Image: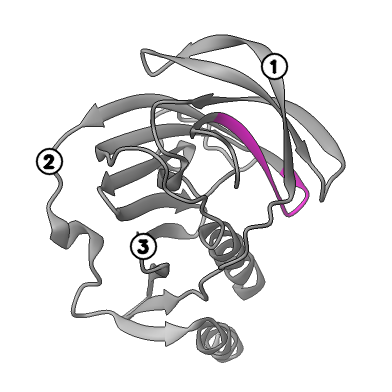
Amino acid sequence: MYKLLILIVLTIFVAGCSLPEPIFDNFEGKFVYSVDSPLNSPNPEDSINYQIVYAKDSMLRIDSYTPIGKQIYIKHIPRNRAYILMDLGPKKVAIQTIPDTSKASKYIFDYKMGSKKMAERKAKNISVTDTSHDTTMVMNYLPEISPKYSNAIKGIPGLPAKYKLESNGMWITYELKSIEKQSMDIDYFGIPSDYEIISLDSFIDLIKKQDQSN
């Protein structure tokens, strides 16, 4: 179990460190994505089938739902400082990620004609090559919203609207279902006082100790 937990956190950790430079106007509100994965629940309303992204200007929060529970990723974009919040039984931790200052991306983009309607908006097509898997796919993005509000496809020229990510041998498809502009409380992007801030290495050691004690 602890290996699966570490793998999920590492996936969020790596993706969370890969944000493009902010180039658009700030956004405040919520994005909802559907998640199509072999791990999906047969119940279409189950939270594991969705990911919710909250944005407030330069702040980002991503709520993800996995077979082992909910995980919250928060980031202050200009400071490049981020944490993954998790509940480990009675212990609550905020895992501090290591900022990525690299400009490099594993993706190569090419023009693709056409678009699709997603979340009541026109999402442009784009050809994306994932060089780490030698795979080329057609994805979609919203050119009017900054890509800084997504951790997914580094270098894409807008907010990813439909895209695929590989995780542990599985391809997972994310599709934007709704966009809602709304006022967001700044406290929603902070670390609650009952969470302990720890490093990624400390988190891995903690999970190993819990697994050995079971």
Q: Residue at x 53, y 11 (%)?
A: 116
- Residue found farthest to the front: 23
Give the mark toward the camera: 1 or 2.
1
User: Does residue 161 belong to the magenta stretch?
Assistant: no
Q: How far apart are marks 3 and 2 (CA)?
A: 20 Å
Q: What residue type is labelled 1?
A: Lys
Position in image of residue 1 (x %, y %): 61, 70
Q: Which residue is identified by label 2?
A: 183
In this rendering, the answer to whether 82 lies above or below 203 is: above
Q: How many labels does the image show?
A: 3
Task: Report helix, strand or loop for mark 2.
Answer: loop
Q: Which residue is identified by label 3?
A: 78
Q: Distance between the residues labelled 1 and 2?
A: 35 Å
Q: Earlier in the sequence, mark 3 or mark 2?
A: 3
Q: Which residue is identified by label 1?
A: 112
Q: Which of 93 and 26 is in front in this view?
A: 26
Query: Which residues make up the magenta segment?
Result: 162-170
Position in image of residue 26 (x %, y %): 28, 42
Disc 3 crowd rating (10 Å Cα; few below 14, some 14-19, many 20+) is few
Give the mark toward the camera: 3 or 2.
3
- Residue found farthest to the right: 134
The numbered mark at residue 24 is none
In this rendering, the answer to whether 69 lies above or below 145 is: below
